[in-house]
Amino acid sequence: RGATKAARKEAAAAAAAAPASPHRRARAPGSSSGHGSGNMEVGAYLTSISKSLKVYASVFQKLGYDDLSMLYEIEDQSEIDELLAALDNAAVKKPHRKKIAKVLVELAGLEQ
């Protein structure tokens, strides 16, 4: 694992306290994606990656992932697999699934 759970929580809290900017986003420790800030709503975060991903926000919310800080707290691949299975059930498009899977792994600080 790249970053510890405590470090990810600290980064999420710091990002939430920082002023939001649509052009510059805080990074999770160990993340190269550069997407997101702490308490950003999942729908807004998905839109920041690609406007077409916002349609999947309800899938995240149904599983309890309401804001970005909750995604930083994913601890293992099984949690990502649960989200991806729910997206599959919602008929996620294959390229969207790949993009979301990559971002989830980066946010969680897990190795691919």
Image (spheres, helix red, strand yellow):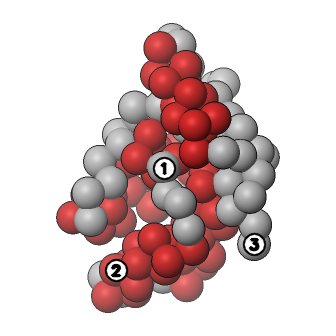
Instruction: Identify the residue shown where x is 75% and y is 72%.
Output: 112
| x, y percent for residue 36 | 55, 37
N-term-proximal mark, 2 vs 3: 2
User: In this orientation, which residue lies closer to the viewer: 16 or 9?
Assistant: 9
Q: Is residue 102 visible?
A: yes
Q: Whole-Å distance between the Cαs marked 2 and 3?
A: 20 Å
Position of residue 57 measured from the top left corner of the image (x, y, whole percent): 33, 58
Kindly identify the residue that appears in the image at 61 percent across and 51 percent down.
107
Looking at the image, can residue 31 be seen? no
Label 3: which residue? 112
Disc nearest the viewer among 2 and 3: 3
What kind of residue is marked 2? Ala
Q: Which mark is residue 86?
A: 2
As drawn, 4 above or below 15: below
Reading the image, the residue beneath label 1 is 73
Cα–Cα span, label 1 and label 2:
18 Å
Q: CA distance from mark 3 to mark 1?
A: 17 Å
